[in-house]
């Protein structure tokens, strides 16, 4: 508990410059379960100074030294898996099995894939008499969200370490306890002082001072497009690199040659996973118009068995959404879908009937959705699926691409060649064919207002590296 009221700066747990506390809410009960200290620009200055002081030595460490550190971090992380799962469940409402098997293990997966990438990563290559060198970019500000807290912390910290960078992490203040545990893991692994620093706080009070800080060389941000724009604006004055993974409104095209029942059922599950709180969730399902009613019947049957309830109950499949703010936003969007004429197939406004407190949302499916409706345009970030009919493949592709976002897209087909041809025409950073398993080696990031830069595996290192040409290096 004591570390929740401190920050991790320069290898030590320290008190904030100006004492201030923030309640952390359990979304399943709407009650405070702990508090954290929150910081200010003065705390950011201390953390950045520590990272800046540590950079010259850490940037010159060998590949072998950084591999050894990452392997120690991975071992310490795996020792805390149960603690991480419990924290994820309390702070953002994930059912315990999901918190352990998906949320917590995503962090270890990123550590493992970064270790593998670092073993063979080419930091230099010779072209004629010029040597091309990839060097650590410097001090990095890492700003992470609440919906997949360990996934996003690990997929930023691991490549920053691999590249030889130093860093300051601001976890989401809504789901901060996993960040505390991660800092304890970094300490247990013997991370050199100043290489990793953690400061809790809000976006305006800590995130923006990090992004605008003149001694920060790079910002890696995951969150909403609105917040990403704010970060980019304050970072622009110092012309630093900004890598962003932002919002999404991913289309899931079910082609006429797909098995409709299988495709719709898996699509419903994909949309509802993590209570709909994934930026790459397949939230717009596109089905052939002549099978639209059949798709609605399958979706209704697939949605109704989802058990919503206490994250600690073994029967629960979906926990609450993370906060009162998110609950109210989702309710307003469900009401907008009804008001604008979409067909309510399953779920609807309000909590499930058996729950009278907690930020629980009824798993909801809309049919007869058109792409100009609010529920088809805005990122809902809850268990709400919109089903849109299309008349032919050209219209399906046009609808899929008709969005300001471009993080992910999905294609379902009985003909892999057909699916590949459609995938080639979709404007998204990740296209999933026939619901494949998660691949932590695949580059993750978006087109358009879903951001820029790529994360995961080898691809994650590039944003943390500068490219230097040493011309006249010689034979």
Image: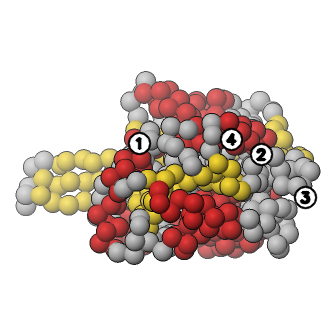
Question: Sequence-wise, which precedes: disc 2 or disc 1?
Answer: 2
Q: Earlier in the sequence, mark 4 or mark 2?
A: 4
Q: Give the Cα distance between marks 4 and 3.
A: 23 Å
Q: Using the image, tell me which numbered label, if any, was put on residue 179.
A: none
Residue at left offset 74%, top offset 65%: 304
Q: Quadrant of residue 126?
A: bottom left
Proximity of marks 3 and 2: CB atoms separated by less than 8 Å: no
Task: In the displayed orientation, state which residue is furthest to the top.
Answer: 237
Numbered tag placed on residue 338 in the rendering: 4
Q: Residue at x 34, y 60 (%)?
A: 423
Residue contact at pointers 4 and 2, CB within 8 angstroms: yes
- Residue 293 placed where, x, y %? 57, 60
- Disc 1: which residue: 402
Q: Nearer the viewer, mark 4 or mark 3?
A: 4
Residue 349 circle label: 2
Q: Residue at x 75, y 69 (%)?
A: 305
């Amino acid at each position: 508990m004591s570390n929740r009221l401190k920050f991790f700066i320069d290898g030590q747990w320290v008190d904030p410059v100006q004492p201030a506390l923030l309640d952390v809410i359990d979304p399943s009960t709407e009650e405070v379960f702990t508090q954290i200290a929150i910081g200010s620009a003065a705390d950011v200055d201390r953390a950045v100074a520590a990272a800046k002081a540590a950079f010259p030595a850490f940037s010159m460490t060998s590949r072998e030294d950084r591999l050894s550190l990452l392997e120690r971090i991975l071992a310490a992380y795996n020792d805390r898996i149960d603690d991480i799962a419990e924290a994820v469940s309390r702070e953002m409402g994930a059912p315990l099995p999901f918190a352990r098997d998906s949320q917590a293990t995503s962090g270890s997966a990123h550590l493992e894939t970064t270790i593998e990438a670092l073993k063979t990563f080419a930091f230099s290559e010779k072209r004629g008499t010029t040597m091309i060198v990839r060097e650590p970019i410097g001090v990095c500000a890492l700003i992470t969200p609440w919906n997949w807290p360990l996934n996003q912390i690990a997929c930023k910290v691991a490549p920053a370490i691999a590249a030889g960078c130093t860093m300051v992490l601001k976890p989401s203040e809504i789901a901060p306890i996993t960040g505390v545990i991660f800092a304890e893991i970094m300490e247990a692994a013997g991370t050199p002082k100043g290489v990793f620093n953690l400061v809790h706080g809000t976006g305006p009070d800590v995130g923006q001072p990090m992004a605008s800080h003149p001694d920060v060389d790079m910002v890696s941000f995951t969150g909403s497009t609105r917040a990403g724009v704010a970060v980019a604006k304050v970072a622009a004055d110092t012309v630093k690199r900004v890598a962003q993974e932002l919002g999404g409104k991913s289309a899931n095209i079910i082609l006429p040659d797909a098995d409709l029942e299988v495709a719709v059922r898996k699509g419903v599950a994909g949309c509802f996973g993590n209570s709909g709180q994934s930026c790459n969730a397949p939230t717009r399902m596109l089905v052939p118009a002549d099978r639209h009613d059949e798709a609605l019947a399958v979706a209704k049957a697939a949605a109704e068995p989802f058990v919503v309830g206490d994250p600690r109950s073994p029967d629960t499949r979906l926990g609450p959404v993370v906060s009162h703010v998110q609950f109210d936003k989702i309710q307003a969007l469900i009401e907008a879908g009804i008001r604008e004429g979409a067909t309510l197939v399953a779920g609807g406004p309000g909590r499930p009937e058996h729950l009278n407190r907690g930020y629980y949302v009824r798993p909801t499916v809309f049919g007869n959705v058109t792409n100009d409706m609010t529920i088809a345009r805005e990122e809902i970030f809850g268990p709400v699926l919109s089903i849109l009919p299309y008349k032919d493949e050209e219209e399906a592709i046009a609808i899929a691409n008709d969005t300001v976002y471009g993080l992910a897209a999905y294609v379902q087909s009985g003909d892999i060649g057909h699916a590949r041809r459609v995938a080639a025409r979709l404007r998204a950073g990740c296209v999933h064919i026939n619901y494949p398993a998660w691949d932590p080696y695949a580059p993750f990031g978006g087109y358009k207002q879903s951001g820029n830069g790529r994360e995961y595996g080898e691809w994650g290192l590039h944003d943390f590296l500068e490219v230097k040409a040493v011309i006249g290096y010689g034979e």
